[in-house]
């Protein structure tokens, strides 16, 4: 019992640190551990309160979580609307009292629905205005979501806030149903149209305004600002109403990727005076068990952190196991999501590791086991991430111009950056970051978010470009810096690609451009051919270079795309291309360590102190009995970060002066961190 009390005391100190409270010096972490906010979402089943609360207390004592939020669905339903808080208040008080018996952690409330997620079974009050959407996949415009521009909806939300305040929760968390764009494409209800017409002096109808925002970027941006302000005003009223009963209660906000431009304002409006705004990022995998596109979600995570200015906000990951059992999400994927998000710089997580529809305790055991066993790993990784200097390659995040993006014009932080995914899976050690002194990978989706000066600097340092990005840069006047003229399309269907030494490789597909060298320094690394046959005679006609390098700029003719039948860039990814790309990379910049083998893994490279750190996530389904690495200089020691947070030396053999083999198994769908000393 004595040790349990000590653990609880230390963990309480961690939770207090998160909120800026004073912690006695003796309770501060001696190793300066990174204090992360990890919130557990739990159901309220009073019949099982003892088991549920003991489980939550154990999660806290194991260091898996720092806070717990009991879930309430509070969106208005029925005519007149029922009072959901009064119905849930007794359950909350009963569950909180039970939990206080076992652990001193902070206990809050997740408002799982405030205006509604749009479920078909929801029944909004007949006299409440509902959101009307532009979503192209909706059979009708009218949703099951109430519009917070309606004074009746605002009055309802203020009443909810006051009643929640009287419960004195330690915090509130507003779920991501409170959004404008993602899956909805805005609100075009009669109230919003009338308000916008009054603001602008126009006389739009729903149809004419819909056309205007689609076709006129100026109108789109103006209407987006108007929507953001009206939704934000309702949150300010909610905050003010909560202050009547509980002014010190902070409110965290769950954002969505396509609503990111509103998230900072919403979080500031909701935060308690003097407390840091908290935003949960929208980087969940949502039952996507494949790891093939995992780099895409992590790039988006880094882009959201950069867009929101991570220093101003406390940004949490969303390792959602939806629908919260292993039929949907494996514990291995949850572990990779946690590690990958920490690599990008999150400050914690909102955990869904408990089934919420029924009491099913067995379904969360695997999640609990892996989070407990990797707690030290996450802590050490977070410390490294905060001290790192990027090495290798920078897969550049959207530039400053993206701050003025238009969501109605399909400009989103979660653009499908397939080239970044392909380069990551080809073994290019990529850090998702702002442009730095390293070689840059540029994708077409964000090419116009960078200024001419930024582009020129990146090309001078070294860059890797897909064909569509090269075409756009040529259109902007950068042909001289690229060493090629680039034209859209290709003269004939290409089915064969050969390296300059004649070796064949699987031909690039997707969107192709034609590259025409304009300098004697432009090296053609591969050629695309059109193949024809006349009887037994086979003829190859050269159509365009497939890969070229000019000085420190590597360009592909193709741009990887997702296809319904071939979703994993199989035409682009192969052993031969991987070796060719990594060979060029080592000539463009110094790369201390590379994985050039055939396995599907994602790697980063950091410098921490005088040691090289190599975070790894295995993306494939096959275990690797050992790992072969190419090194620019021979390390004297290689170590691997263990789940408990300690380092263990890894035996390796020297195959050549530039190649070593780590004599250790690397399991599928796992995070690893390697440390090289010289």
Image (cartoon, grey):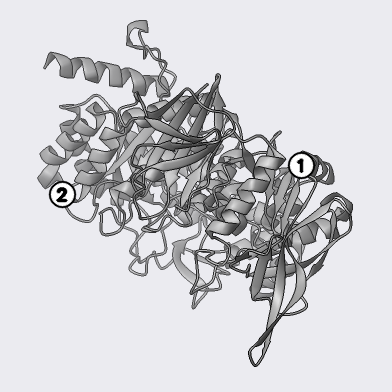
Q: Is residue 248 visible?
A: no
Q: Looking at the picture, how far across and down is residue 450, in whole percent?
A: 76, 47
Q: Secondary structure at mark 1?
A: helix
Label 2: few (<14), some (14–19) or many (≥20) C-alpha neighbours in 10 Å = few
Which residue is painted at 83% across and 46% down in the image? 452
Residue 422, placed above or below residue 3: below
Circles 2, 1 touching at the beta carbon (< 8 Å)? no
- Residue at 66 percent across and 75 percent down: it is 207
Question: Where residue 512 appears, x then y in whole percent?
Answer: 70, 69
- The residue to which callout 2 is attached is 362
Give the mark toward the camera: 2 or 1. 1
Query: Which residue is at a point 72% across and 43% down the rendered structure image?
Result: 400
Residue drawn at 22 percent across, 56 percent down: 357
Which residue lies under the disc numbered 1? Answer: 458
Q: Is residue 391 above or below residue 440?
A: above
Mark seen at residue 537: none
């Amino acid at each position: 019992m004595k040790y349990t009390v000590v653990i609880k005391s230390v963990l309480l100190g961690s939770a207090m640190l998160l909120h800026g409270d004073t912690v006695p010096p003796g309770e501060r972490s001696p190793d300066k551990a990174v204090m992360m906010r990890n919130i557990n979402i739990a159901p309220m089943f009073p019949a099982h309160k003892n088991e549920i609360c003991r489980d939550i207390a154990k999660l806290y004592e194991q260091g898996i979580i720092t806070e717990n939020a009991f879930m309430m669905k509070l969106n208005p339903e029925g005519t007149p609307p029922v009072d959901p808080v009064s119905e849930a208040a007794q359950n909350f008080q009963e569950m909180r009292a039970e939990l206080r018996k076992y652990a001193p952690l902070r206990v809050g409330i997740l408002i799982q629905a405030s205006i509604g997620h749009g479920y078909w079974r929801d029944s909004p009050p007949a006299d409440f205005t509902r959101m009307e959407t532009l979503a192209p996949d909706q059979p009708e415009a009218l949703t099951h979501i109430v519009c917070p521009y309606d004074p009746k909806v605002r009055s309802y939300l203020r009443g909810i806030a006051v009643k929640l305040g009287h419960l004195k929760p330690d915090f509130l968390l507003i779920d991501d149903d409170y959004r404008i764009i993602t899956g909805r494409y805005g609100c075009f209800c009669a109230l919003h149209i009338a308000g916008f017409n009054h603001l602008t002096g126009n006389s739009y109808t729903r149809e004419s305004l819909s056309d205007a925002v689609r076709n006129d970027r100026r109108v789109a941006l103006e209407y987006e600002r108007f929507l953001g302000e009206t939704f934000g005003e309702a949150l300010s009223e909610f905050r003010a109403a909560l202050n009547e009963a509980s002014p010190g209660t902070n409110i965290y906000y769950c954002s969505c990727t396509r609503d990111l431009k509103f998230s900072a304002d919403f979080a500031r409006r909701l935060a308690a005076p003097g407390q840091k705004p908290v935003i949960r990022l929208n980087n969940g995998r949502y039952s996507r068990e494949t790891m093939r596109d995992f780099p895409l979600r992590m790039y988006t995570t880094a882009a959201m952190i950069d867009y929101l200015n991570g220093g101003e906000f406390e940004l949490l990951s969303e390792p959602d196991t939806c629908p919260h059992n292993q039929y949907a999400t494996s514990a291995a994927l949850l572990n990779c999501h946690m590690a990958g998000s920490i690599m990008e710089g999150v400050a914690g997580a909102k955990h869904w590791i408990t089934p919420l529809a029924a009491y099913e305790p067995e379904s969360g055991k695997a999640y609990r086991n892996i989070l407990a066993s990797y707690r030290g790993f996450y802590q050490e990784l977070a410390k490294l991430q905060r001290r790192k200097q990027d090495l290798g390659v920078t897969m550049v995040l959207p530039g400053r111009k993206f701050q003025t993006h238009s969501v109605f014009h399909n400009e989103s932080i979660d653009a499908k950056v397939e080239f970044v995914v392909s380069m990551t899976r080809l073994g290019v050690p990529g850090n998702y970051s702002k442009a730095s002194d390293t070689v840059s990978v540029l994708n077409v989706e964000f090419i116009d978010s960078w200024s001419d000066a930024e582009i020129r600097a990146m090309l001078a340092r070294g860059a890797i470009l897909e064909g569509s990005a090269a075409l756009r840069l040529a259109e902007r006047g950068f042909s001289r810096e690229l060493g090629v003229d680039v034209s859209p399309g290709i003269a004939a269907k290409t089915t064969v690609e050969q390296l300059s030494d004649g070796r064949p490789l699987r031909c690039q597909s997707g969107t192709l451009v034609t590259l025409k060298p304009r300098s004697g320094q432009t090296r053609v690394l591969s050629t695309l051919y059109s193949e024809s046959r006349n009887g037994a005679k086979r003829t190859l006609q050269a159509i365009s270079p497939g890969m070229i390098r000019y000085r420190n700029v590597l360009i592909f003719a193709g741009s990887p795309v997702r296809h319904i039948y071939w979703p994993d860039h199989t035409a682009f990814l192969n052993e031969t291309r991987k070796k060719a790309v990594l060979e060029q990379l080592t000539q463009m910049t110094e790369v201390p360590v590379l994985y050039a083998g055939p396995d599907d893994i994602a790697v980063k490279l950091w410098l921490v102190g005088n040691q090289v750190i190599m975070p790894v996530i295995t993306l494939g389904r096959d275990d690797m009995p050992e790992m072969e690495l190419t090194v620019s200089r021979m390390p004297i020691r290689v170590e691997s970060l263990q789940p408990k947070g300690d380092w263990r030396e890894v035996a390796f053999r020297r195959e050549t002066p530039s190649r070593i083999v780590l004599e250790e198994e690397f399991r599928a769908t796992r995070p690893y961190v390697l440390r090289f000393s010289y």
